Image (spheres, rainbow, N blue to C red):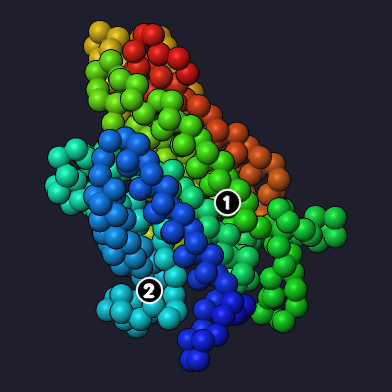
Amino acid sequence: MSPIALCIGSTVIYWSAFVITLGLLAALLMTLYLQQASGGRRATALLFMILTLVLSVPLCRAIHWYCHIEQYDSLREALTNYSSGSYVLSGAMLGAWLAALIASRFDRRSSTASLLDAFAPGAALAVAFIRLSALFNSSCRSKIVFHSPALRHLPLASGVINTAGQVEYRFATFFVQFLLMLVICWLLLRFFSRRRAVPMKSGAAAGNTARMFLLYYGACELLMDSTRYDSSFMHFNGFVSMVQIIAAVSILALLVYYSVHSVRAAGGRPTGRHWRFWGGWFLALVIVGMSEYLVQRFGDWYLPCYSAMAVGCLLMVFVVYRVYQSCCAEDDRP
């Protein structure tokens, strides 16, 4: 049960909700600042953030309803009664894109891509706070249980009450993701300040910060969603979760996008460097896929499987980032 932060009459505010609100506020302020820094209007960014919230909540909820239909009486109940159930955060990506598409129509100085660029670091920060909130409602959903007393502490493990009323220590999936998202937020801020305006040889500079968010966040979700026992699956697939599929498709789409621009910049034909890039990405995919299979097939192989999966995810990020760099101007520096 979530600890209560504040009671005002019949109004109860929980710590988890308070932390999420802080995260959304921090994301808003960061987006407003980055929007102004990129030459856009803060009013447009504010409209974008409002639309993102309005559109993302029902989308995230609808995806969770589809994957966990047994938890709801109907889709209408899922979209109107938010007192129970959960969300699939990946749906917010579509909500943010739709919001940027709408908000950019009201400001000629802001394109859909530039709005998403300004939002990307704040989005990572918001996800970080959402994951941190799990520490205040005992909602750690990891399937990895630690039995050694030496491992029963943060950042590795957190205590939760099981169905028998006993405290057990599970891998702190959400807290570890909180730390990873803070790192991703820092990387995106660094990218925004140093590379946002770097032109590509055959494409615009706008939108690359948002694409880096998809790359980093997708790699993070590929790994972290695998550790959860409540992952959301499509009805016809019980092996790879929907979140992992969305993450893998996003990373593949980025590889294709940057590869097209890189090949164009190289004269229209793939070079040996491109084949090495694609081979490295395929190797990373094999590592991630085999690790996922083995960890599901042999439940106690957590350490070697997730270590290998982490290496595969990092290799994916490295390859796609290198392909992106190959699209940039010759005088560009990493």
Q: Secondary structure at mark 1?
A: helix
Position of residue 92 measured from the top left corner of the image (x, y, whole percent): 35, 56
- Residue 187, above or below 198: below
Visible in this render: residue 265? yes
Position of residue 1 measured from the top left corner of the image (x, y, whole percent): 60, 79
Q: Nearer the viewer, mark 1 or mark 2?
A: 1
Q: Which mark is residue 177?
A: 1
Q: Earlier in the sequence, mark 1 or mark 2?
A: 2
Whole-number angstrom distance, CA of label 1 to CA of label 2:
26 Å
Position of residue 174 measured from the top left corner of the image (x, y, whole percent): 59, 57
Using the image as rendered, state which of residue 188 and residue 45 is in the foreground: 45
Using the image as rendered, state which of residue 84 and residue 13 is in the foreground: 13
Q: Which residue, as the protein is rendered here, is positioned at the far right?
A: 149
Position of residue 98 measured from the top left corner of the image (x, y, whole percent): 23, 52
Quarter of the figure with residue 275: top left
Measuring 39% from the left and 66% from the top, which residue is drawn there? Answer: 64
Instruction: Quickly name the residue at label 2.
Output: 69
Q: Which mark is residue 243?
A: none
